[in-house]
């Protein structure tokens, strides 16, 4: 079944579902997805998995008298759909009222074609065996920088999305995605380096060779690393690290639903409150060119927007869906239906190169290229957490260009400290995303210099 046939099938199923749910609920949303995804996984210097999977599914939202229900239909046989809708009616009649739910946005809306063009590259859907060449070239680049072994993954694919609601909203779009990450290993078991490159288009910010070079270079520089000394340091973090320890303030804590649930370290904060250094400005931008999370509309059908969250260190707005928006406020285009979802978290870059960030740091400084195992002691203010650097970490002595590899140190801090003590930013943003990211969002971020961060060790 080709894509056009799948679209026709989903349209037919959607029509059937609509006829069945209109008599039993006041508000409804039908979202159809056609997914064609590929994965290449490589390890021990060779490809060990190459697979493709296709999926058709429908996400369904229903509301009746403020009782709400969300369900995903993977079994699209007509008999199964009928049984599921009958069960949904029973659940709606017995469910408790959702105190957060108000209504859906009122359509119709006009969605810009520019966004659709910026998130779909037909070449991605035709990669096929050519995708292996990206892996091979990145691997060669990694070896050229001194790595002895490599591993990683390359996910790529296209998807088609259509959406219809009870409020006269209907829209559809196609989207492509590229997510390549590579990890390099030296003979020294502690010397590793990782890099990634992500985009929606092959010729817009997607560069596996550069990722391979960076991973190999970090790995080679990390050879001979010694156990670091616990203490307080300035740290310079790579863009990828931002997804773990800087972006969550915008992508997670500024979620109106999370705040109402008491799981945000910004609980009690309001518009105009100072939460960060004045050099920090952050947007949630669902319209960002080539962003993995960019889309013409959200899961309610509200048009995607660029929303200013933090303006020079001051809270400007929390992001919401329609129900959680305050009176006389519009949705920020972040549904999620029940729980708003971030799109692309975008930091305003600064004016420093990496070398300049190193030069202006007046205290012993750690260059941190990657982290994992970010864990929270509490989500309550100020959002205390720890995060473990996993790949190359380097000690930069005052104004020195020599990087001394160190290991076995853990970041112990809180989000208020990380935001307020940000001294300077790099001049270029990089699009990054990691599965470890607590908010699961895409981030556009530069290098960042942060002052007086506590580093501890768990071993003697």
Image (cartoon, rainbow, N blue to C red):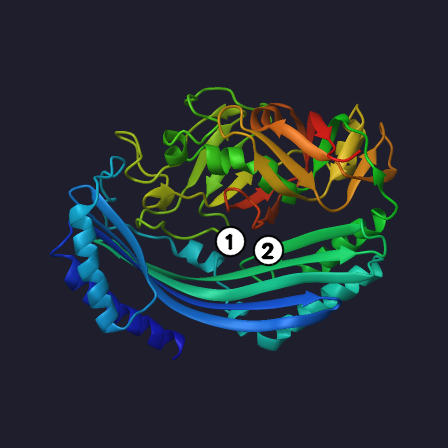
Residue 348 visible (yes or no): no
Please determine whether, in this image, residue 344 is positioned above or below residue 423: below
Q: Nearer the viewer, residue 457 or 201?
A: 457
| Residue 112 point in image, percent of width and height | 37, 53
Position of the N terminus, as image quadrant, is bottom left
- Which residue carries the number 1 mark? 292
For the residues marked 1 and 2, what is the alpha-carbon distance in whole angstroms? 8 Å
Tell me if residue 131 comes above or below residue 236 in the rendering. Answer: below
| The quadrant where residue 272 appears | top left
Taking the view exactly as shown, the residue that stands out farthest to the left is: 23
- Residue at coordinates 51% horizontally, 51% vertically from top-left? 289
Give x and y (percent) for residue 32.
33, 62
Position of residue 236 relative to residue 47, above or below, is above
Q: What residue would you read off at disc 2? A: 198
Please give the name of the residue rendered at 47% of the width and 40% of the height, measured from the top-left corner: 284
Element carrying mark 2: strand
Q: Nearer the viewer, residue 176 or 353?
A: 176
């Amino acid at each position: 079944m080709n894509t056009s046939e799948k679209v026709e099938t989903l349209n037919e199923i959607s029509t059937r579902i609509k006829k069945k749910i209109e008599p039993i609920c006041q508000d409804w949303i039908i979202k159809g997805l056609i997914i064609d995804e590929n994965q290449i996984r490589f390890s021990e210097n060779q490809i060990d998995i190459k697979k493709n999977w296709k999926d058709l599914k429908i996400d369904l939202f229903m509301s009746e008298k403020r009782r709400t229900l969300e369900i995903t239909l993977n079994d699209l046989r007509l008999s199964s759909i009928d049984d599921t809708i009958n069960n949904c009616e029973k659940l709606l009649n017995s469910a408790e009222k959702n105190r957060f739910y108000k209504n859906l946005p009122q359509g119709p809306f006009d969605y810009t074609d520019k966004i659709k063009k910026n998130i779909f590259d037909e070449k991605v859907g035709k990669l096929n065996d050519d995708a292996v060449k990206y892996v091979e070239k990145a691997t060669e680049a990694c070896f050229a920088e001194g790595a002895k072994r490599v591993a990683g993954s390359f996910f790529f694919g296209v998807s088609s999305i259509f959406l219809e609601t009870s409020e006269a909203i209907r829209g559809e779009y196609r989207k492509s995605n590229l997510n390549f990450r590579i990890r390099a290993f030296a003979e020294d078991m502690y010397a590793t380096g990782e890099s990634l490159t992500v985009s929606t288009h092959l010729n817009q910010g997607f560069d596996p060779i550069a990722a391979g070079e960076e991973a190999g270079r970090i790995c080679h520089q990390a050879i001979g690393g010694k156990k670091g000394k616990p203490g307080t340091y300035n740290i310079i973090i790579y863009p990828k690290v931002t997804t773990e320890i800087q972006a969550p303030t915008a992508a997670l804590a500024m979620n109106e639903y999370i705040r109402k649930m008491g799981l945000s370290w910004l609980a009690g904060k309001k518009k105009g409150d100072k939460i960060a250094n004045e050099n920090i400005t952050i947007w949630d931008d669902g319209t960002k060119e080539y962003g993995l999370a960019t889309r013409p509309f959200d899961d309610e059908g509200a048009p995607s927007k660029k929303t200013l969250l933090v303006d020079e260190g001051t809270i400007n707005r929390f992001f919401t869906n329609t129900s959680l928006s305050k009176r006389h406020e519009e949705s920020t285009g972040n549904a999620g239906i029940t729980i708003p979802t971030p799109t692309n978290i975008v930091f305003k870059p600064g004016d420093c190169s990496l070398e300049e960030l190193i030069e202006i740091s007046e205290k012993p400084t750690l260059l941190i290229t990657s982290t994992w195992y970010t864990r929270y002691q509490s989500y309550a203010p100020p959002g205390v957490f720890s995060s473990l650097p996993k790949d190359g970490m380097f000690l930069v002595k005052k104004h020195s260009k020599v990087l001394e590899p160190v290991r076995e140190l853990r970041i112990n801090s809180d989000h208020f400290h990380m935001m307020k003590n940000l001294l300077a930013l790099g001049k270029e943003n990089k699009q990054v995303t990691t599965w470890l990211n607590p908010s699961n969002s895409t981030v556009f971020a530069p290098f960042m210099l942060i002052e007086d961060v506590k580093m501890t060790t768990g071993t003697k």
